[in-house]
Image (cartoon, grey):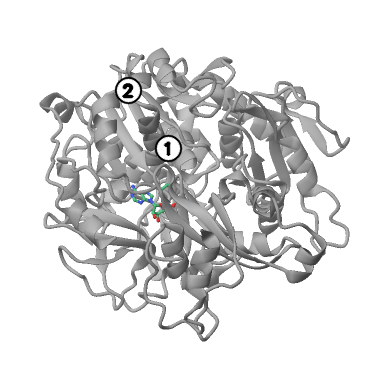
């Protein structure tokens, strides 16, 4: 690892933006000076770019750390800022969403049309008794209704919890229960990999048969969009079709102002324990930083740009850079339903050519999988509209960065490598594309108004050239406000480590180079990053031991050429199970099992059936050693193991 890092840090290639790009860029160098001179005043200026029903007089309140408030005496309506405001400014005919279904269906939705739709949905929700502070689960494919649903919930001051459509019924159930959702918005199904993938049955399963589970059923209604056309079961009284209720609802709906700290959404993400954390975000500060970062990092010129962020709305990237940031800025964006390689491997490039996409934001794992297929595929399409490229979700290796620049960006489009997290709500570390000389592989500099450092375990700066832990040293507007229902876990996870300094601990290793640029080195905890998605080792282990065959399980993230990391599991099978069942096919059964329990993204790439696991004398599993095995390396120091022979047994069993 460290030789690889030294290699990275000796990267000498630099790419300055063209003079034309720099001249026209939204974000200029003076932003850094203004923010350095008066950080809170700088953020207040950014917040005033939004429409406030009641202007704020307060900025940051950090009197009760780690619980921050921003602009707390102001009132705003998030949906009004993303919709009505643009219509009232005369931009109602501008296209908000250029939607392309995987099967080739198309819809162009203007700001006026989206506003009308959201007002109707808001009326439907209120008619169903949903009001400010209530939770609404959203489990939808990438269709315009998904964006409309989020905004309608925001419009009435309720709280959405979007659950990625690839999650299983069990994962959905856990999220519905934790948040106590009153309503679920879903679809019959959506297109994925060339066929309809059903969603409604997972909702039915998540809500079925709660008797005896001890959990109080909170869901009163299920609102169902028809997209896949697949048959669905129906529970009269509970289930409602979107197309039978929304068009009939009134298009008049006045946007009420809500306090800046009114919760906007909960989004679940994996932590170091088996139970996902409900990350809570609020309204004013979140929208301020979402809009600002989208404007200056993605250099949005709303009159001329066609922006495309490929993330699903089930992830934070989809929340901030599909729904809230671009719409707050009045941008025109592509919304694409399916997978990148259906019906053909050039599908994304075809979409870029068709809509003339100018700003493109995607993940390194996607870039690496396109590299594998070969440059011939993108080279069949006209990508000359692209003028800016972005990367998010995991470190982008210099090879992938250079391929992205050369093959997709025609050696001219700047690349912004953006570091942030579900918890940070918006981009924190990134180049400004009209200002920064970019470096392949480094996320580079904190944005104006953001302060970070790389420190040792005691919180002391490690200085240039040394590895350490990434911290955020001052509160920021879009920071998480807590973990839903668990203030203690919020403190423990993010703030206890550097309590005396008041630093936010991000969970990432990092290093500063001689220019002070940040290089991200991956997670320092038991969180894996697979294709830019966060997965917890503990969550997958707990799914595995939930299977009748499994006695014990240990999961590690092993490096993978395409997905960054891959899930590798080591399991011990119960003797009693083996007496009654054949061992053949067990690994593949267990892969399928994890897929059902959590979702297909969590399915281990490899499952090794072993006789023992490496443990310390106190019983802690030494994952580091298992990672050595999974990555085909010589096994490291085993002296702290209770049984030092165990690794050679495991290595033999894995071969
Ligand atoms: C973790 C957060 C940010 C939205 C998508 C993922 C890793 C994210 C980068 C980057 C290196 C990155 C970190 C972080 N990460 N962006 N540009 N370079 N690492 O959000 O699921 O909350 O995961 O993703 O490890 O902690 P998330």
Tell me: 507 left or right of 6. right
Look at the picture and state if 405 lies above or below 556: above
Task: For label 1, count other residues whose C-alpha is less than 10 Å away and answer few (under 14), some (14-19) or many (20+).
Answer: many
Q: Is ligand 1 closer than 8 angstroms to the Cβ of mark 2?
A: no
Task: Identify the residue position indicated by label 1 in the image.
Answer: 321
Q: Pointer 2: what residue?
A: 358
Is 376 or 318 nearer to us in this picture? 376
> Is residue 395 left or right of 529 when viewed as pictured?
left
Residue for point 55% across, 24% down: 114
Residue 3 visible (yes or no): yes
Q: Percent x, y for residue 643?
A: 51, 82
**Residue 150 place in picture, x, y as percent:** 58, 38
Q: Is residue 459 above or below residue 533?
A: below
Q: Are marks 2 and 1 in contact (CB under 8 Å)?
A: no
Instruction: Give me the residue at 81% from left, 35% from top.
Output: 239
Q: Secondary structure at mark 2?
A: loop
241 or 628, which is in the foreground?
628
Which secondary structure, mark 1?
Answer: helix
Say which label, 2 or 1, has the lower sequence index.
Answer: 1
In the image, residue 556 sits, relative to residue 137, either above or below, namely below
| Quadrant including the N terminus | bottom left
Instruction: Name the quadrant containing residue 331.
Output: top left
Residue 344 screen position, x and y as percent: 50, 20
Viewer can see residue 180: no
Where residue 104 appears, as percent x and y from the top left, is 56, 15
Q: How many marks?
A: 2
């Amino acid at each position: 690892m460290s030789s690889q890092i030294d290699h990275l840090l000796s990267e000498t290639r630099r790419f300055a933006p063209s003079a034309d790009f720099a001249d026209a860029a939204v974000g200029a160098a003076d932003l850094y000076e203004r923010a350095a001179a008066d950080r809170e005043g700088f953020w207040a200026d950014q917040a005033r770019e939004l429409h406030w029903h009641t202007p704020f007089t307060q900025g940051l309140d950090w009197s009760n750390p780690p619980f921050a408030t921003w602009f707390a005496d102001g009132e705003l309506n998030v949906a009004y800022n993303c919709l009505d405001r643009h219509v009232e400014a005369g931009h109602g005919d501008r296209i908000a969403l250029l939607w392309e279904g995987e099967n080739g269906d198309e819809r162009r939705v203007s700001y006026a049309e989206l506003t009308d739709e959201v007002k109707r949905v808001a009326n439907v929700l209120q008619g169903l008794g949903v009001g400010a502070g209530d939770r609404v689960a959203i489990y939808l494919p990438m269709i315009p209704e998904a964006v409309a649903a989020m905004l309608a919930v925001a419009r009435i001051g309720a709280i959405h919890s979007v659950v990625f459509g690839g999650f299983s019924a069990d994962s959905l159930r856990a999220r519905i229960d934790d948040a106590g959702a009153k309503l679920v918005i879903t679809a019959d199904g959506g297109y994925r990999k060339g066929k309809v993938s059903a969603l409604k049955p997972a909702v039915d399963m998540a809500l079925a048969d709660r008797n005896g589970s001890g959990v109080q059923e909170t869901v009163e209604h299920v609102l169902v969009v028809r997209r896949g056309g697949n048959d669905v079961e129906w529970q009269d009284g509970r289930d409602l079709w979107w197309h039978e209720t929304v068009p009939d609802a009134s298009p008049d709906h006045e946007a009420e102002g809500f306090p800046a700290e009114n919760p906007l959404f909960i989004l679940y993400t994996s932590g170091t324990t088996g139970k996902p954390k409900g990350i809570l975000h609020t309204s004013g500060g979140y929208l301020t930083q979402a809009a600002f970062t989208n404007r200056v990092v993605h250099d949005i010129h709303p009159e001329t740009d066609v922006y495309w962020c490929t993330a699903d709305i089930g992830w934070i990237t989809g929340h901030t850079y599909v729904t809230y940031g671009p719409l707050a800025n009045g941008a025109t964006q592509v919304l694409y339903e399916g997978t990148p390689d259906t019906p053909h491997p050039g599908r994304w490039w075809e979409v870029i050519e068709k809509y003339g996409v100018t700003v493109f934001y995607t993940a390194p794992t996607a870039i690496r999988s396109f590299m594998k297929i070969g440059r011939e595929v993108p080279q069949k399409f006209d990508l000359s509209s692209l003028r800016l490229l972005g990367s998010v979700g995991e470190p982008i290796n210099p090879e992938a960065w250079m391929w992205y620049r050369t093959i997709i960006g025609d050696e001219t489009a700047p690349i912004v490598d953006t570091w942030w997290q579900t918890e940070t709500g918006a981009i924190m570390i990134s180049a400004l594309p009209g200002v920064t000389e970019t470096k392949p592989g480094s996320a580079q500099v904190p944005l104006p108004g953001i302060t970070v450092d790389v420190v040792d375990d005691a919180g002391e700066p490690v200085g240039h050239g040394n590895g350490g832990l990434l911290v955020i040293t001052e509160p920021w507007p879009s920071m998480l406000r807590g973990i839903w229902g668990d203030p203690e876990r919020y403190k423990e996870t993010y703030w206890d480590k550097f309590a005396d300094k008041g630093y936010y601990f991000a969970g990432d290793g990092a290093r500063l180079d001689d220019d002070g640029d940040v290089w991200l080195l991956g997670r320092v905890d038991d969180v894996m990053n697979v294709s830019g998605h966060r997965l917890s080792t503990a969550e997958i282990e707990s799914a595995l031991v939930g299977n009748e065959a499994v006695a014990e399980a240990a999961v590690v993230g092993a490096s993978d050429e395409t997905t960054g990391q891959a899930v590798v599991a080591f399991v011990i099978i119960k003797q009693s199970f083996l007496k009654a069942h054949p061992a053949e096919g067990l690994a593949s059964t267990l892969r399928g099992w994890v897929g059902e329990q959590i979702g297909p993204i969590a399915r281990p790439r490899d499952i090794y059936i072993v006789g023992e696991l490496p443990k310390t004398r106190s019983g802690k599993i030494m994952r580091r050693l298992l990672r050595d095995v999974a990555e085909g390396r010589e096994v490291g120091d085993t002296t702290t193991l209770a049984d030092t022979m165990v690794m050679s047994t495991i290595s033999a069993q894995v071969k």
